[in-house]
């Protein structure tokens, strides 16, 4: 029996050494261009232990990512994470990305509505260039005890029952949100400048009519949170994370997804055109989209990911806030920002100026 045990032990040792050798032979260095919090140290170490790949993390933002990849024509990095509205334009103009082989992505790990929307918004000439990772939204942050029965959508901020106690920014999300709440689809009109202007004209009229309801047009997150905490503002347009932060202090205040849909941004995974570690890149995507790993990224970054079921692994209080704000129907109803065509920002800017100047 002892000699047999020694044989099995020896065989297992040889197998284990062989497995490590194979892993080492296939190991690559992944040069990751990403945002702060998206590749926490503990996740990087877990990935290395499992795959053998090392990860070199360069923290950046949208403008810097595009500048770096443009300067090298897509070189220097193997995986990058620009927002989805920074893919189509830069690809058409500079050719800095290469298509993603969707067959190498574990699609079952993604929230399907987010995966479909991102793939659609990052398709260039029939080929997909981006899949979703970290996301967030803007919608309604309110004192539900004071406004919960009144404010269900963006245009409800104009209800006389909350006059003088609402706030929003004079920025494009307000224009887009009000358009959807008024039954229009501004994103569908992106390809038709005249149609888009018609939508914005209607939104302009609504926002001018709504001015008496506005306590103030907030400019920064701290300003808004102070107004909501003090009770001067009972309903506003703001980000989900801001609402959840306020909820930690006052359970009546939270983020609510509007009935017409929250407005969403997504930071993606893309492959730079001259990346040389595709195997490590695909391994990283599939690794960090596992629900239990995705929850670690949420803890570090503060935002949730497109990993299906990851909320179950989040810290208990954050999980409760997320699940209360985003039932499945609200997730599927998020309106994801597509790339903004040239010319539309000038239309929006003129509308915002006129709303601000109106008496």
Image (tube, helix red, strand yellow):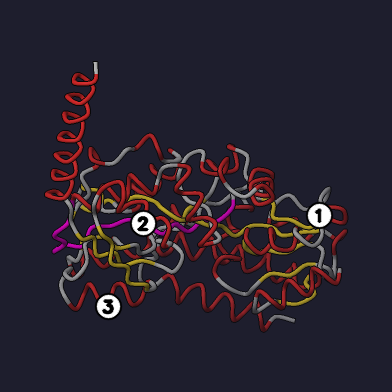
Name the side, left or right, on which 182 lies relative to 230.
left
255 w.r.t. 63: above or below: above
Residue 45's disc is 2
| Image quadrant where residue 338 sits | bottom left
- Judging depth in this view, the residue of 94 and 230 nearest the camera is 230
Q: Is residue 275 magenta?
A: yes
Q: Quadrant of the C terminus?
A: bottom right
Q: Nearer the viewer, mark 2 or mark 1?
A: 2
Which segment did they paint magenta?
262-278
Marks 3 and 1, how far apart at CA: 43 Å
Element on which disc 2 rests: helix
Q: Position of residue 12 (x, y in %)?
A: 20, 30
Residue located beneath label 1 in the image: 251
Q: Nearer the viewer, residue 347 or 154?
A: 154
Pointer 1 local density, CA inside 10 Å: few below 14, some 14–19, many at least 20:
few
Q: Which mark is residue 67?
A: 3
Locate residue 157, reporting x and y percent: 75, 60
Dot 2 or dot 3, earlier in sequence = 2
The location of residue 99, given as percent across then percent down, is 19, 52
Q: CA distance from mark 2 to mark 3?
A: 29 Å
């Amino acid at each position: 029996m002892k000699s047999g045990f020694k044989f099995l032990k020896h065989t297992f040792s040889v197998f284990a050494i062989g497995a490590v050798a194979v892993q080492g032979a296939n190991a690559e260095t992944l040069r990751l261009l990403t945002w702060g919090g998206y590749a926490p140290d503990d996740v990087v170490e877990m990935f290395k232990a499992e795959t053998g790949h090392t990860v070199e993390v360069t923290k950046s933002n949208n403008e810097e990512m595009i500048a770096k990849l443009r300067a090298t024509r897509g070189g220097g990095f193997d995986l990058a994470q620009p927002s989805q509205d920074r893919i189509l334009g830069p690809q058409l103009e500079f050719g800095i990305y290469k298509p993603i082989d969707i067959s190498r992505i574990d699609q079952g790990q993604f929230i399907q509505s987010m995966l479909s929307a991102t793939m659609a918004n990052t398709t260039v000439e029939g080929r997909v260039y981006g899949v979703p990772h970290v996301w967030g939204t803007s919608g309604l942050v309110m004192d539900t005890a004071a406004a919960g029965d009144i404010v269900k959508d963006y245009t409800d901020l104009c209800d006389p029952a909350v006059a003088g106690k609402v706030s929003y920014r004079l920025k494009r999300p307000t224009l887009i949100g009000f358009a959807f709440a008024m039954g229009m689809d501004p994103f569908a009109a992106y390809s038709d400048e005249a149609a888009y202007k018609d939508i914005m004209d209607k939104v302009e009229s609504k926002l001018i009519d709504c001015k008496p309801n506005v306590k103030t047009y907030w400019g920064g997150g701290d300003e808004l949170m102070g107004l909501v905490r003090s009770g001067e503002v009972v309903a506003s347009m703001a980000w989900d994370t801001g609402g959840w932060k306020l909820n930690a202090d006052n359970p009546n205040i939270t983020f609510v997804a509007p009935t017409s849909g929250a407005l969403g941004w997504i930071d993606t995974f893309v492959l730079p055109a001259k990346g040389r570690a595709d195997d490590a890149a695909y391994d990283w995507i599939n690794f960090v989209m596992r629900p239990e790993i995705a929850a670690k990224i949420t803890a570090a970054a503060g935002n949730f990911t497109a990993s299906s079921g990851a909320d179950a692994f989040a810290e208990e209080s954050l999980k409760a806030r997320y699940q209360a704000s985003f039932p499945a129907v609200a997730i599927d109803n998020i309106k994801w920002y597509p790339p903004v065509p040239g010319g539309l920002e000038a239309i929006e800017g003129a509308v915002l100026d006129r709303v601000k100047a109106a008496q």
